[in-house]
Image (cartoon, rainbow, N blue to C red):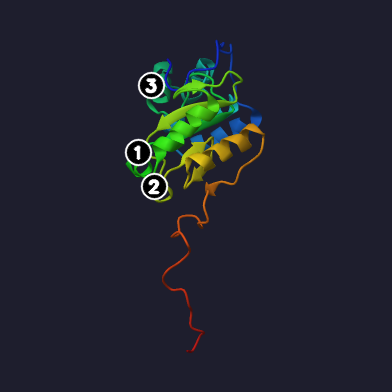
């Protein structure tokens, strides 16, 4: 039951797991979206909630808890959790750095971005820094192709990167700061670089 990032050192599986009151209420709302007898369909979002509560990974106790909550075999929960790369079977760093290397990002320089991450963090793909602050992953398309190359750190996207701006993002995170998300160049979201090139003037009403 292990895939993805390797922890910085030996780790123990917690003996038990239970949703916090807030997360249990959130889970109940999700389960209620499904008709009677179909509650097991809620397994993916509930795994996400459990992973967040556990600090970014899924202990066996959490998966066993969800199996009982949804009335499904534990092995079925294991199968779902181990299939999706978004779920981590072992502890990850405080900052999970996911570098997209799919074709659009690769064509725009993801090799340099990945190399910058390896150099600055001193780790390779699927490793965690000894202090537990950073984990590094290579992933498939993260859906921001027009802003390639990009990385995802936890829930945040950093786009239009170079090796230099990647280092700035990592250094800011290491200092405990919250670097600006989105494009790291002068671009508004996914608009053309340099601003609009059409419809740049507008006529007043009645003209």
Mark 3, residues whose alpha carbon is within 10 Å: few (<14), some, or many (≥20)?
Answer: few
The residue mark sitting in front, 2 or 3, is 2
User: How many numbered markers are drawn?
Assistant: 3
Of the two numbered discs 2 and 3 on the same chain, state the one appearing first in sequence. 3
In this orientation, does residue 137 appear?
A: yes
Is 181 in front, or is 185? 185
Q: CA distance from mark 1 to mark 3?
A: 26 Å
- Residue denoted by label 2: 145
Residue at 58% across, 24% down? 54
Q: Residue 121 location, x and y as percent? A: 54, 27
The secondary element bearing badge 3 is classed as helix
Of the two numbered discs 1 and 2 on the same chain, state the one appearing first in sequence. 1
Of the two numbered discs 1 and 3 on the same chain, state the one appearing first in sequence. 3
Residue at 46% across, 74% down? 200
The secondary element bearing badge 2 is classed as helix
In this orientation, does residue 45 appear?
A: no
Q: Which mark is residue 79?
A: 3
Q: Residue 202 location, x and y as percent? A: 48, 79
As displayed, is residue 90 above or below residue 205? Answer: above
As displayed, is residue 61 above or below residue 97? Answer: above
**Horizontal arrangement in the rendering, residue 207 relative to residue 55 (left or right):** left
Is 9 in front, or is 164? 164
- Give the quadrant of the N terminus: top left
Q: Residue 158 location, x and y as percent? A: 51, 43
As displayed, is residue 74 above or below residue 195? Answer: above
Q: CA distance from mark 2 to mark 3?
A: 30 Å
The secondary element bearing badge 1 is classed as loop
Q: Are marks 1 and 2 in contact (CB under 8 Å)?
A: yes
Q: CA distance from mark 1 to mark 2?
A: 9 Å
- Residue denoted by label 1: 102
Most extreme residue toward the bottom is 207
Q: Are marks 2 and 3 in contact (CB under 8 Å)?
A: no
């Amino acid at each position: 039951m292990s895939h993805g990032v390797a922890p910085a050192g030996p780790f123990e599986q917690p003996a038990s797991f239970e949703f916090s009151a807030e997360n249990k209420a959130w889970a109940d709302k999700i389960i209620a979206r499904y008709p009677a007898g179909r509650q097991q369909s809620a397994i993916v979002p509930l795994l996400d909630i459990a992973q967040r509560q556990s600090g970014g990974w899924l202990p066996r106790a959490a998966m066993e808890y969800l199996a009982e909550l949804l009335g499904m075999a534990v092995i079925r929960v294991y199968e779902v959790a181990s299939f999706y790369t978004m779920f981590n079977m072992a502890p990850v760093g405080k900052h999970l750095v996911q570098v997209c290397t799919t074709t659009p990002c690769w064509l725009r320089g993801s090799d340099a971005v990945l190399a910058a991450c390896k150099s600055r963090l001193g780790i390779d793909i699927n490793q965690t820094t000894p202090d537990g602050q950073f984990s590094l992953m290579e992933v498939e398309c993260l859906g921001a192709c027009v802003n390639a190359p990009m990385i995802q750190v936890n829930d945040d996207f950093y786009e239009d990167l170079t090796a230099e701006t990647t280092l700035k993002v990592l250094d800011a995170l290491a200092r405990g700061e919250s670097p600006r998300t989105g494009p790291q160049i002068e671009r508004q979201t996914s608009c053309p670089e340099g601003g609009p090139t059409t419809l740049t003037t507008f006529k007043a009403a009645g003209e």
